[in-house]
Image: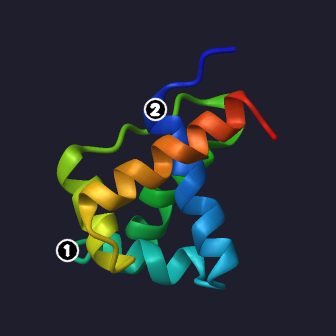
Amino acid sequence: MKIEFERVFVRFIVNYLTEKRISHSDFARQLFPDLSEEIAVRQWRRIRDPRGGGKPRKLTLSESERISSILNIEFPSLIWQVDQYNKNLKDPK
């Protein structure tokens, strides 16, 4: 089964937030600082887990870069980590 890199990226971020015990609400407020808290949380939910089987909201490249900044991980390093995570999904050891 082919999984889009963007979906793997989101899955990686969700796992990272869980491991670091960062709430999705806190993360959403940082990711979308110009939006109200309610809308920011809703936007992040639409990205990570749309309700009712709806199509997930796409991440922009600038949002992905902002995520790396929030997590304090250099963007190229974050992409590399996601790539390694993706390889492990395809070939679990």
Residue type (three-letter) at the residue carrying disc 2:
Phe
Quadrant showing the C terminus: top right
State which quadrant residue 1 falls in. top right
Dot 1, how many residues are within 10 Å of its Cα: few (below 14), some (14-19), or many (20+)? few
Q: Which residue is mark 2?
A: 5
39 versus 60 height, above or below: below
38 versus 54 height, above or below: below
Residue 27 position in % (x across, y down): 46, 77
Assess whether mark 1 and mark 2 are in contact (beta carbons under 8 angstroms): no
Residue 61 position in % (x across, y down): 21, 46
Residue nearest the viewer, comparing 7 with 36? 7
Q: Check residue 34 in the rendering and tell me which mark sits there, or answer none.
A: 1
Residue 15 position in % (x across, y down): 65, 62
Q: Residue at x 58, y 24 (%)?
A: 3
Question: How many marks on residues?
Answer: 2
Identify the secondary structure beneath mark 1: loop
Q: Residue at x 53, y 78 (%)?
A: 25
Residue type (three-letter) at the residue carrying disc 1:
Asp
State which quadrant residue 21 falls in. bottom right
